[in-house]
Amino acid sequence: MRSYRQTLTRLCRHLGENAPLRDVTSHRVAEVFAAAWGTAAGATWNRHRAALRSFATWAAERGWAAADLAASLDRRPEPRARTRSIDRSRLESLWKRPDIPLRERTLWLLLYESAAPAEWALSLNVEDLDLPGMRGEVKARGHWLRWQSDTAALLPLLVEGRRRGPLFLADRRPGPGRMPVAADLCPDTGRGRLSYERAEYLFKRATADVDPEGSGCTLHRLRHSRLAHLGEDGWSAPMLMSLSGHGSVRTLHGFVRIPRPADTVA
């Protein structure tokens, strides 16, 4: 909504808020885009372009626009930037912060120690856990998440005697209009499964001081950091794949040196 508002506000400022929509051409819109975001990064350009396309579709459905307002705007490439790992000392400080709730502390440590995607950890049920073995089964993936002592110490406190249902629960019970499926509902508390969006928001809020841009770190960056740290400690690609569940050694190129065929000595 914020991005949508920013795009349309800038367009209205340049085109005139009272200008009839039928008089606005794609060529004129392209001129405004060039002036406003011509030197912006590809991701920024594409975000504003997507907002305009959404508005144009909505307006066309009501017969208010005769032409595609974004017809002259090509999508720009978005170079994939290398994800920066989070410094180990900063993560150690995060684990020890007294203001972090048990649920968040457990989830973040589990994600870090297992190097697993957040979606896998959030899909865990209480009955999927092997607490003595310090592992949990992601049945949809046929993969076992493995954690270490810090996570192992917190999980029994988080479970609190529950025998089944989602491991990580939402803050409150869902309303009648947003009732989740039975598999995502705790039979003991009536609360639903913690969503990825909520978990991401909480982590970004807690790590705003770690991020140079001040917007906080993503859960993907937390996983990336674990892989980077293990690579620095000498873990090989097969060892990382076994822990994290990566399906291809090529995806670990940024963490360990992947030998090329020319590097192999017969």
Image: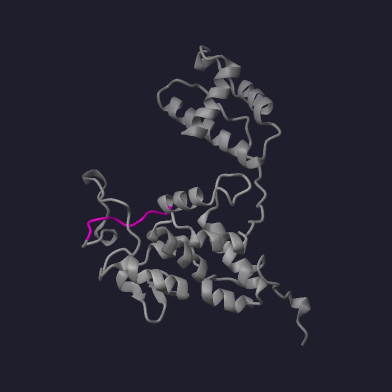
Report if residue 125 is visible in the image. Answer: no
- Residue 98: give x, y in percent of width and height: 45, 57
In the picture shown, does residue 255 fall above or below 45? below
Picture quarter with the C terminus = bottom right
As rendered, which of 25 and 266 lies closer to the eye? Answer: 266
In the picture shown, does residue 245 fall above or below 99? below
Tell me if residue 194 is in the magenta stretch.
yes
Residue lying farthest to the bottom in this orientation: 266
Tell me if residue 39 is in the magenta stretch.
no
Q: In which quarter of the image is residue 155?
A: bottom left
As rendered, which of 24 and 194 lies closer to the eye? Answer: 194
- Residue 134: give x, y in percent of width and height: 42, 78
As rendered, which of 26 and 231 lies closer to the eye? Answer: 231
Q: Which residue is drawn at 57% across and 30% down?
A: 70
Q: In which quarter of the image is residue 158?
A: bottom left
Q: Residue at x 51, y 11 (%)?
A: 18
